[in-house]
């Protein structure tokens, strides 16, 4: 039985809490910079997160705004300008150190690297955002493959980013595990055949999520995870916990 070979990480909400005080704030800064009276409060942005992709989210929001441009072409042009300005604001925020990794992530990445696991990223967000976050935190050296929202025709919940990452690594889905925070992210990973574990994030902690091999509050605390880690005990989630959560879901464990 080949063991767990790779871990594919989601970014927003999983590696770092980027949405509420990051992307949302950057969008509001872009609206102000472009003289738009729009502002996304925490609750409204949480609703908009049902739409994958910042540009797509913006275009969706415009459908409910009477002061949005009338023509689809004008809306696409405006969304492009806002999103470009937003990405500049967001990456500046990240480079200023305002978006730390979630507790326990840095240590777990280090343990996985030391154990020789192959590590990658599969995300909906813009590549510049990921590069800025890695450079401002753990550096890019650990990431063997990075598939972003710009690299595939369809974003999560479509499985494309995960399929592409597995293809680059030349691994079968059952040789890896995905780490996610959102229902759409889990759908994307499951759609690619990957077992997936969920770390509850600010926006999706209460969300109904199907098909996770395990789910818990974060990697800094083994308490509160289901299935309960074995052996029981407090402290950070370790690579062995991931292996145990992965094993039953991996094909080599299947009886058929
Ligand atoms: C989360 C997303 C992204 C971000 C905003 O991606 O859906 O759209 O919210 O980034 P993931 P952009 O959880 O898959 O990392 O504005 O660059 O899309
Ligand atoms: Mg996410």
Image: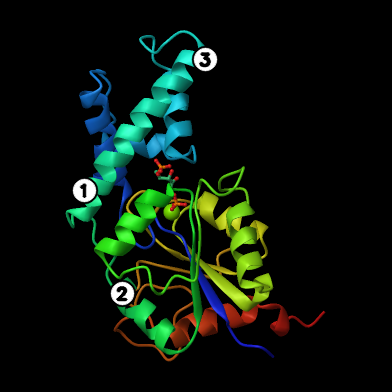
Query: Mark 2, mark 1: which one is toward the viewer?
Result: 1
Residue at figure coordinates x 63%, y 53% from the top left: 160
> Residue 241's spot in the image, x, y percent?
46, 83
Mark 3 vs mark 2: which is more N-terminal?
3
Q: Secondary structure at mark 2?
A: helix
> Residue 238's spot in the image, x, y percent?
39, 84
The one of 58 and 230 positioned closer to us in this rendering: 58
Label 3: how many residues lie within 10 Å, few (<14), some (14-19) or many (20+)?
few
Q: Which residue is mark 1?
A: 93
> Residue 86's spot in the image, x, y percent?
30, 36
In the depicted structure, whether residue 65 falls above or below residue 251: above
Identify the disc placed on residue 72: 3
Residue at figure coordinates x 69%, y 73% from the top left: 172
Distance between the Cα atoms at labels 3 and 1?
Answer: 31 Å
Look at the numbered discs 2 and 1 and tell me whether their residues touch, using CB distance below 8 Å. Answer: no
> Residue 54's spot in the image, x, y percent?
42, 37
Q: Secondary structure at mark 1?
A: helix
Mark 2 vs mark 1: which is more N-terminal?
1
Q: Quadrant of residue 82?
A: top left
Determine if residue 241 is in view: yes
The one of 40 and 75 positioned closer to us in this rendering: 75
Identify the disc placed on residue 179: none
- Looking at mark 2, is its residue's CB closer than 8 Å to ligand 1? no
Q: Ligand 2 is located in which of the four quadrants?
A: bottom left
Distance between the Cα atoms at labels 2 and 1?
Answer: 20 Å
Is 187 on the left-hand or right-hand side of 76?
right
Q: Which residue is mark 2?
A: 106
């Amino acid at each position: 039985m080949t063991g767990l070979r790779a871990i594919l990480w989601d970014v927003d909400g999983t590696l770092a809490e980027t949405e509420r005080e990051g992307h949302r704030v950057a969008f509001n800064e872009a609206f102000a910079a472009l003289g738009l009276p729009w502002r996304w409060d925490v609750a409204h942005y949480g609703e908009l997160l049902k739409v994958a992709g910042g540009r797509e989210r913006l275009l969706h929001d415009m459908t409910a705004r009477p002061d949005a441009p009338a023509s689809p072409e004008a809306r696409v042009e405006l969304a492009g300008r806002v999103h470009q300005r937003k990405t500049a604001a967001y990456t500046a925020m990240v480079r200023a150190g305002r978006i730390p990794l979630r507790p326990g992530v840095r240590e777990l990445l280090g343990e996985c690297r030391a154990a020789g696991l192959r590590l990658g990223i599969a995300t909906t967000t813009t590549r510049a955002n990921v590069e800025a976050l890695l450079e401002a935190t753990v550096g890019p050296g650990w990431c063997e493959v990075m598939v972003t929202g710009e690299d595939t025709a369809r974003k999560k919940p479509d499985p494309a980013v995960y399929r592409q990452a597995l293809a680059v690594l030349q691994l079968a889905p059952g040789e890896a595990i995905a780490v996610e925070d959102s229902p759409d992210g889990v759908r994307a990973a499951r759609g690619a055949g990957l077992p997936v574990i969920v770390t509850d994030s600010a926006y999706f902690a209460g969300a109904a999520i199907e098909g996770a091999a395990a789910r818990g509050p974060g990697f800094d605390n083994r308490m509160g995870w289901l299935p309960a880690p074995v052996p029981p005990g407090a402290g950070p989630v370790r690579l062995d916990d991931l292996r145990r959560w992965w094993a039953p879901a991996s094909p080599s464990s299947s009886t058929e």
